[in-house]
Image (tube, helix red, strand yellow):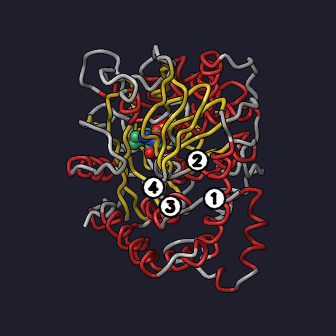
Amino acid sequence: MTRADLLQRLEEEPLWDMIVIGGGATGLGTAVEAASRGYRTLLLEQSDFAKGTSSRSTKLIHGGVRYLQQGNLTLVLEALRERGFLIRNAPHLVHNLSFIVPIYDWWEGPFYGVGLKLYDVLAGKLGLGPSRLLSREETQRHLPTVEPNSLLGGVMYHDGQFDDARLAISLALTIADLGGVALNYLQVTGIIEEGGLVAGVEARDGESGRGFRIKGRVVVNAAGPFIDGIRRMTDPHARNLITPSQGVHLVLDGSFLPGDSAIMVPHTDDGRVLFAVPWHGRTIVGTTDTQVAAATLEPRPLPGEIEFLLTHASRYLTRHPVPADVLSVFAGIRPLVRTGGGNDTASLSRDHTLLVDNCGLVTIAGGKWTTYRKMGEDTVSAAAQVAGLDERPSVTASLHLHGWQEGSGPDDPWQVYGSDAPALERLLAENPAWSEPLHPAFSCCRGEVVWAVRNEWARTVEDVLSRRTRALLLDARASIDAAPAVAGLMACELGKDRAWQQLQVAAYCELARGYLLE
Ligand SMILES: Cc1cc2nc3c(=O)[nH]c(=O)nc-3n(C[C@H](O)[C@H](O)[C@H](O)COP(=O)(O)OP(=O)(O)OC[C@H]3O[C@@H](n4cnc5c(N)ncnc54)[C@H](O)[C@@H]3O)c2cc1C
């Protein structure tokens, strides 16, 4: 279904059962939940799907070893359950990855070994493999570049790894498969109230500038770090629910961490967990936790955060990364829910919070990617009550997401397309030039740009390079070089002229420069 078809549906539907604001993990999960229960569902995203925090995560589907350290067993248990569901429901996007805690002090082996056994027990039947102690030699076999000085061994455990923006696209496609409508570049500009109760939203099409008045039985505010702005559309005095905190990741060449495992450092200088994770042939190092004044869609890393990550990576890797080694740096804003006083965002709740305002606006805040489905389930149950809709049971714990197919492994570049891969292959056969690589630095080909426009609602060069392919995150400089080719291919598909291409390339280069260190 094209964007024009979706806009047509928007015009034809006089009353939606649920309108969801925000096309990140939370909003998409909520809309899949609503559509799968048979409610007439509309999701509106002001920018592109996963433009916000949901494309900027550490890419882990995890119980959260850190929450185990904090003693938050309920959160760990729930996340491990969700991890198990997701790996079953989207095996083309989520896979099992081994993590190793390198041991440099004698007490760390038994300490982390026991903790991770508890993690295994909590995962129960949905576990991805038992944790175990490794000798020094075994640790070096899995992590050939781990710092060998004083290395005693390691503790290996298992968690899930995924491609966050691709999961978001799969969720948007799932909404369409279920008969719902998910529209990108449609910003909610106001809330319609009738008799003091929420009755719909006002929205503006970011492409045409056209305004819409859209009626709904209930409106769900799933705008992540921006939920307070939406709440103030109905109550200008609403106090802030969110304390925004920024997390930064560095992307390095894959040679910094060859082998089959990730490194997990349970305790950095500021008491955080640090990961070095192999992803799409690169190494991601992250993250930080820095309270920021306000949320923005393009947060910028601070020099201190980069310094912190380079210093900590150097402690655990034989090759010490310097700024020139950084292929890309990206930052995301955690939508953490305020829990009272205190300035330490590392200890704020990662759990989710549901709130129904007096006017009936339902707000869902906090949580993490791993628990998006449960957040959606809880939200839709509450929203259905607010709207007086028939109660219908949740089916998403076993709902296969769009593209469902047994995983062929993270090394298959087409793995993220799942069951769509044969159709993509047929598309490439239509034009020999489409099988050519987009750029030597990336495994994607030119035809994937055409696919993204025709089948995944990509509207801008950034949509393609940042979230349909992950070129921006994998190598920001090379992605700048690829931008003119992407603009040319998109222009043919969308019927755009040269001026559009030039504007797109200029806007993309400006954005991508923010992902470069030098
Ligand atoms: C650094 C970092 C690392 C993380 N790592 C992990 C991890 O490894 N695993 C994990 O499980 N979780 C992780 N998380 C948490 C997870 O990424 C977030 O909890 C999740 O992505 C939040 O999704 P969201 O939909 O609530 O917010 P967002 O993704 O920000 O989505 C909100 C959306 O609302 C839209 N919006 C705002 N205003 C409007 C409007 N007026 N109209 C229409 N749309 C609007 C925005 O454009 C945005 O796209 C991480 C978070 C951070 C910051």
The residue mark sitting in front, 1 or 2, is 1
The residue mark sitting in front, 3 or 1, is 1
User: In whole angstroms, how far apart are the C-alphas of marks 4 and 2?
Assistant: 25 Å
**What type is the residue that disc 1 sits on?**
Ala
User: In whole angstroms, how far apart are the C-alphas of marks 1 and 4?
Assistant: 14 Å
Residue at the image point whose x is 40% and y is 74% from the top: 505
The residue that disc 3 covers is 463
User: In whole angstroms, how far apart are the C-alphas of marks 1 and 2?
Assistant: 21 Å
User: In whole angstroms, how far apart are the C-alphas of marks 2 and 3?
Assistant: 12 Å
Residue 4's disc number: 1
**What type is the residue that disc 3 sits on?**
Asp
Residue 168's disc number: 2
Which sits in the foreground, 318 or 472?
A: 472
Residue at the image point whose x is 48% and y is 48% from the top: 211
User: In whole angstroms, how far apart are the C-alphas of marks 4 and 3?
Assistant: 19 Å
Q: Quick check: can you spot residue 101?
A: no
Q: Which percent across, then down, holds residue 482?
A: 46, 76
Which sits in the foreground, 395 or 390?
A: 390
Please state if 22 lies on the left or on the right of 454 as rendered: left
Q: Residues within 10 Å of mark 2 (few under 14, many from 20)?
A: many
